[in-house]
């Protein structure tokens, strides 16, 4: 801007000097900003000649010049050429002081324009006030301020901008600033940018009156003003003046005429101006095309706009994004927003696109075109916004903030927020919008937004209300949040509780009382059937209840003043609630405060001789509720809510008799919630009769009503406990009928029920309940739910008295078998297997495996053989690996000290089994031997593995051993093994199969990296790295994942989508932006894709 | 002789460690806290690292927003270490900055606008 001022001056003094053209070129963009801005219809009188115009068009991007324009240099130059100011600025001292100040103001405005291409009204006003305070505003300061009142304020509406310009004009004049033509020209410019309607002739008269001579620029702008109104006649009049004074007619004048004819409805003449220009030896410049394009935009003629763009492309004057933005703005304002996407698509996203587009969005929002602004917003490059900080995306903050400042309706805001969120542009737009609303103290909007958030399942927290409360606390005279008509009626309880937490933090008694008064007066807060005084009274009760004893004691004085203040506002409370409050205060040991509450009671006579007994604590609360109940009854008002509250309180206090009595008295008003609480209490008090009575009562009232699953299960448990099995089963059936599903917590209750029965040995109870629950599908036969039966079985079995009469299911038998096997009760396990097979039951694969393993570790060779035969007799249905038997046979040999036989057994697998056996794994044996630290066996097995590898080219055993070393962290041994048997490194499938398994376990990544290091020239690195990434994913280790990705890129590997997807997930989980495009499909999709690809890869189990 | 002096030094070190531990406050200083989070949420979040003894989150009385930082006190060194080992800490999509609180918060007087919870 300093440069701007200087250029303007130079311009005035020597309109055609080469030096000046260079100056304009260098500072072209900021200059243009002040003169025309991004939006305000450029094409209007900036340049003196074609030459200048061209040079500007070269440097038309604002941002491209930013770096070329150090503000300090500008200021220095300005200071160095004071004689060019052509004005007296007072004494030298004063001048230097002014220069200093100007310097400061300049730097501020400059940095704002430089960074963003705009100025905020707040900043401008602050500088204005500062300049005013100094008392001696200079002509240049005035010029600076005036020029800032146009399109540099995209966030302010046009009228506001013009008003501000007038205010500055008048005030500075009053303070002694003297104005010359440049000031009048600046004002004209502001008028044009703000579309301010004025009479050009009057304007000229005003200049004459002030004895200021209009210059060429003045005339140009007056022509533009006429043209803006489509007044060709008026424009011609001024043109006549110019010709009379022999002033050159520049491109800018022609550009204005294009606009003028178009606005007069004469497109033909508008188009013909281009030929007139050519005839006059002036080539149409970019501004000419922008003027033409704007004209078409106002007509909604998208085809012509496209044509114009192409013509411009063909000429020297190709248009920039910023020019296209002008078309977007015009289209939207003229009601042709539907064409905006066509233009937006053509944007080239040149450097500086974002600040320009932001200004466009802001202007559009200010002009009520927020939907178009949103279209533009969505074209913003995403990386730019996600930023280097690696934070979550938050594109559109400026957009949301301005929408809120402009009071856009909440529905629109919610829509934008949802869309920003859905498109992954912003992680928490709704919260940000709320933040802006709170910050701007827009209470109504803030509350509406919170409502939307609540509806969308976003948390609304009490502290969200605090900014509103502090605001109203501070500005005591402005009324209180609740007075806003948009305040919702639904969130009353949230609101009250936040109000209470606000009150507890406050000692501003006056505001508190005012808020309370509003509660009292506003129908929305006191909906019928209750009276306002009751709401207020409960509010007070809850406030005091919430504060608790110590807080009330500490704030006794504040509360006293608050109550007194309430009294002065004629707020009263009913005596019943007063009693509750009194009891609370009494229990808090602040009896003095009671007197201050008494004055609020509406009917004081009833207070004076109240019952002497002062109930405390819960009793107080109960008394309050009971009083309230009887009062409501006496008045014939609905009591359901208070009754339920009372019953629930009694239930919490375990006062069963009193609760039941109350129920009997108020049978007709009882709600389901009350019954449910009572049933629960009865069950807890082991009064199952009463509980069932209540249950029947509910059914009588409404047979369709269902309890929640916990209540059902509590009842079932009580019934089971009392042996009322039929009723318990009936209840389970009812649950099924009424579609009540068993939640986790109620499933636990079922387990406890079964377990209690198990402890008493009630097999029948367990079986019936299990059968019912499982057959109805209420619960799945999980190991947990099956275990009670096994417990009973084991109990009776260990008493080894008699075989129980009941028959276990396949599942239960298998579980039992496994339990025995795990306990090393091999004989018991074997018996169960025997009886299962006799009963035509099929033991599960796991049961057999565990049994055989147990036998192996006991050295029970014969047992293993028997089981193997039996399993063979069952047939192939079990899908059991033959290796279970072989491996455990070998282990049994080892256990029996017969290593030779173990080696022989295993060796035979590979040497005699043919090719099919070559892939069989004996890892399990190695693992066990390693675990047992049986070095003798290990040595022989290792020798065997080497022999198999070196003599028989069978590498499975060696690879298994290598992997087992690796898995046990014996990396040196693994390396040794690898060195002795190089071919291990080539066993890609075996190795990958191990890596695949390992990558699923958290904290195991070390093993994979060790493997990768040991075999640096692994043949299938992509797959290896893919699993490594998976492993990092399991460990949530973004840092390692990042360096893996770097390595992959360095090694030039092409990784699959799953790899990228996993990496992207890690980024996301860490809250960092993904620096690449995340593959769009789901994990499952890519996993399937991969599976298809790698079908046929050998999978192996280790036991 | 050598052994003797070694064990002496160890014992002394242990005593010193014990003395500091008793005075030591296991606090982290958390900044860049998103405005949507209040002390309740902070407590809930940091409880995963160990028992949270206190959470101090100053609110600006003028604006009604918190100031974007808070102190979390754990009841054990372990909680502190667990919290420091995790990186990044992300709450509601924002990355928190968590660092060891070098200056213990003891004896600091609370302003009216600051909440201790």
Image: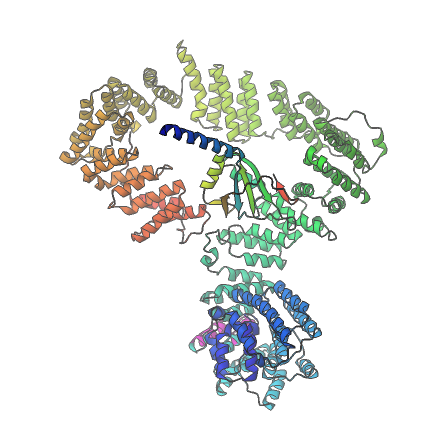
Report the residue at 51% width, 83% height from top. A49
Q: Quadrant of the C terminus of chain A?
A: top left
Image x and y of residue A713, in percent: 55, 25
Image x and y of residue A833, in percent: 33, 18
Instruction: Say whether residue A586 is left or right of residue A1086.
Output: right
Image x and y of residue A1064, in percent: 41, 48
Report the residue at 35% width, 44% height from top. A1029
**Which region is colored magenta?**
A292-313
Establish if A377 lies above or below A764. Answer: below
Q: Residue furthest left?
A: A951
Overall secondary structure of the magenta section: helix
Q: Quadrant of the N terminus of chain A?
A: bottom right
Q: Residue furthest top?
A: A801
Query: Does the stretch in magenta take in A458?
Result: no
Q: Residue furthest front?
A: B1
Image x and y of residue A971, in percent: 27, 36
Report the residue at 32% width, 26% height from top. A845
Report the residue at 53% width, 64% height from top. A116
Instruction: Say whether residue A469 is left or right of residue A1055.
Output: right
Establish if A213 lies above or below B110. Answer: below
Instruction: Say whether residue A142 is left or right of residue B101.
Output: right
Total numbered badges shown on the rendered structure: 0
Nearer the observer, A941 or A82: A82
Query: Does the stretch in magenta take in A300?
Result: yes
Quadrant in the rendering for residue A361: bottom right
Establish if B34 lies above or below A1003. Answer: below
Can residue A636 be seen at all in this image of the molecule? no
Establish if A39 lies above or below A634. Answer: below
Nearer the observer, A797 or A440: A440
Can residue A465 be seen at all in this image of the molecule? yes
Quadrant in the rendering for residue A155: bottom right
């Amino acid at each position: 801007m300093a440069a701007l001022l200087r250029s303007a001056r130079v311009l005035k003094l020597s309109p055609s000097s080469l030096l000046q053209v260079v100056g304009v070129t260098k500072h072209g963009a900021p200059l243009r900003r002040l003169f025309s801005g991004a939006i305000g219809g450029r094409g209007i009188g900036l340049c003196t000649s074609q030459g200048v115009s061209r040079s500007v068009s070269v440097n038309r991007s604002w941002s491209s010049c930013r770096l070329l324009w150090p503000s300090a240099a500008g200021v220095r130059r300005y200071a160095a050429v004071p004689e060019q100011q052509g004005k007296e600025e007072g004494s030298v001292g004063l001048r230097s002081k002014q220069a200093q100040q100007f310097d400061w103001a300049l730097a501020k405005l400059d940095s704002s324009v430089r960074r963003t291409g705009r100025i905020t009204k707040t900043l401008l006003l602050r500088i204005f006030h500062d300049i005013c305070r100094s008392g001696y505003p200079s002509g240049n300061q005035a010029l600076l301020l005036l020029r800032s009142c146009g399109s540099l304020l995209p966030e302010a509406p046009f009228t506001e901008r013009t008003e501000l310009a007038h205010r500055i004009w008048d005030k500075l004049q009053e303070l002694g600033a003297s104005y010359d033509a440049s000031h009048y020209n600046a004002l004209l410019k502001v008028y044009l940018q703000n579309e301010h309607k004025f009479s050009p002739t009057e304007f000229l008269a005003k200049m004459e009156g002030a004895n200021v001579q209009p210059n060429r620029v003045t005339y140009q702008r007056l022509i533009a003003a006429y043209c803006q109104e489509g007044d060709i006649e008026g424009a011609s009049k001024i043109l006549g003046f110019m010709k009379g004074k022999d002033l050159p007619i520049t491109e800018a004048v022609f550009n204005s005429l294009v606009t003028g004819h178009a606005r007069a409805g004469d497109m033909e003449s508008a188009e013909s101006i281009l030929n007139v220009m050519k005839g006059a030896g002036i080539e149409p410049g970019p501004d000419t095309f922008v003027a033409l394009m704007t004209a078409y935009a106002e007509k909604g003629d998208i085809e012509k706009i496209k044509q114009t763009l192409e013509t411009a492309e063909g000429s020297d004057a190709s248009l920039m994004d910023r020019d296209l933005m002008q078309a977007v703005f015009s289209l939207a304002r003229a009601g042709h927003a539907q064409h905006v996407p066509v233009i937006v698509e053509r944007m080239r996203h040149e450097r500086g696109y974002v600040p320009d587009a932001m200004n466009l969005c802001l202007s559009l929002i200010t002009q009520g075109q927020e939907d178009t602004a949103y279209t533009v917003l969505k074209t913003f490059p995403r990386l730019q916004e996600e930023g280097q900080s690696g934070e979550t995306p938050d594109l559109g903050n400026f957009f949301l903030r301005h929408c809120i400042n402009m009071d856009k309706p909440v529905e629109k805001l919610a829509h934008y927020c949802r869309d920003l969120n859905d498109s992954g542009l912003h992680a928490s737009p709704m919260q940000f919008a709320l933040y802006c609303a709170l910050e701007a103290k827009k209470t109504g909007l803030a509350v509406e937004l919170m409502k939307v958030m609540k509806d969308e399942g976003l948390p609304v927290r009490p502290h969200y209300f605090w900014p509103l409360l502090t605001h109203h606390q501070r500005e005591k005279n402005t009324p209180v949040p609740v007075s806003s008509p948009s305040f919702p009626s639904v969130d009353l309880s949230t609101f009250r509780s936040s109000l209470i937490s606000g009150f507890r933090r406050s000692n501003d008694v006056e505001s508190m009382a005012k808020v309370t008064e509003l509660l009292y007066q506003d129908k929305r807060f006191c909906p019928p059937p209750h009276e306002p005084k009751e709401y207020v009274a409960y509010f007070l009760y809850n406030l005091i209840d919430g504060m608790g004893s110590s807080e009330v004691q500490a704030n006794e004085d504040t509360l006293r003043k608050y109550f007194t203040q309430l009294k002065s506002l004629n707020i009263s409370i009913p005596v019943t609630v007063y009693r509750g409050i009194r009891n609370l205060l009494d229990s808090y040991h602040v009896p003095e405060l009671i007197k201050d509450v008494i004055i609020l009671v509406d009917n004081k006579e009833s207070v004076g001789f109240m019952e002497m007994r002062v109930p405390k604590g819960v009793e107080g609360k109960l008394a309050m509720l009971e009083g309230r109940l009887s009062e409501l009854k006496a008045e014939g008002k609905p009591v359901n809510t208070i009754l339920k509250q009372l019953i629930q309180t009694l239930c919490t206090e375990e006062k069963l008799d009193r609760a039941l009595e109350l129920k009997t008295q108020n049978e007709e008003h009882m709600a389901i919630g009350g019954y449910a609480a009572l049933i629960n209490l009865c069950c807890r008090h082991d009064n199952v009769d009463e509980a069932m009575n209540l249950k029947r009562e509910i059914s009588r009232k409404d047979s369709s009503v269902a309890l929640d699953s916990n209540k059902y299960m509590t009842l079932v448990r009580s019934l089971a406990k009392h042996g009322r099995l039929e009723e318990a089963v009936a209840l389970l059936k009812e649950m099924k009928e009424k579609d009540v599903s068993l939640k986790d917590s109620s499933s636990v209750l079922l387990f406890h029920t079964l377990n209690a029965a198990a402890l008493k040995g009630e097999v029948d109870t367990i079986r019936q309940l299990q059968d019912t629950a499982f057959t109805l599908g209420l619960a799945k036969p999980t190991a947990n739910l099956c275990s009670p039966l096994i417990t009973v079985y084991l109990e009776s079995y260990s008493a080894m008295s008699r075989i129980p009469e009941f028959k276990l299911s396949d599942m239960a038998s298998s579980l039992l078998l496994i339990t025995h096997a795990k306990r090393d009760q091999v004989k018991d396990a074997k018996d169960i297997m025997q009886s299962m097979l006799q009963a035509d039951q099929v033991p599960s694969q796991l049961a057999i495996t565990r049994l055989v393993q147990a036998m192996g570790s006991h050295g029970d060779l014969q047992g293993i053989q028997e089981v193997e035969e039996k399993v063979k007799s069952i047939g192939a249905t079990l899908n059991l690996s033959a290796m279970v038997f072989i491996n455990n046979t070998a282990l049994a040999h080892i256990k029996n000290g017969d290593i030779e036989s173990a080696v022989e057994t295993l060796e035979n697998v590979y040497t005699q089994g043919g090719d099919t056996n070559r892939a069989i794994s004996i890892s399990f044996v190695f693992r066990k031997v390693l675990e047992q630290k049986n070095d003798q066996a290990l040595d022989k097995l290792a020798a065997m593995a080497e022999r198999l590898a070196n003599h028989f080219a069978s590498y499975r055993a060696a690879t298994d051993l290598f992997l087992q070393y690796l898995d046990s962290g014996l990396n040196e041994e693994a390396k040794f093994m690898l060195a002795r048997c190089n071919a291990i490194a080539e066993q890609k499938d075996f190795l990958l199969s191990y890596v695949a398994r390992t990558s699923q376990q958290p904290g195991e990544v070390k093993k994979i990296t060790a493997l990768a290091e040991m075999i640096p020239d692994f043949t299938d690195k992509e797959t290896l790295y893919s699993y490594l990434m998976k492993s990092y994913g399991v460990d949530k280790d973004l840092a390692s994942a990042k360096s893996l990705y770097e390595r992959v890129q360095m090694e030039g590997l092409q990784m699959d989508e799953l790899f990228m997807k996993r990496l992207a997930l890690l980024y996301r989980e860490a809250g960092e932006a993904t620096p690449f495009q995340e593959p769009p499909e789901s994990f499952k999709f890519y996993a399937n894709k991969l599976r298809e690809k790698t079908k046929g890869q050998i999978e192996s189990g280790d036991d | 002789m050598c052994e003797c002096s070694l064990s002496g030094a160890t014992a002394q070190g242990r005593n010193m460690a014990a003395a500091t531990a008793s005075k030591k406050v296991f606090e982290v200083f958390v900044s860049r806290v998103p405005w949507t989070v209040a002390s309740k949420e902070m407590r809930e979040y940091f409880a995963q690292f160990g028992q949270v003894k206190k959470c101090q989150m100053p609110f600006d009385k003028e604006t009604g927003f918190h100031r974007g930082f808070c102190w979390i006190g754990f009841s054990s060194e372990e909680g502190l270490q667990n919290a420091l080992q995790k990186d990044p800490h992300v709450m509601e999509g924002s990355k928190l900055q968590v660092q060891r609180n070098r200056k213990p918060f003891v004896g600091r007087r609370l302003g009216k606008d600051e909440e201790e919870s």
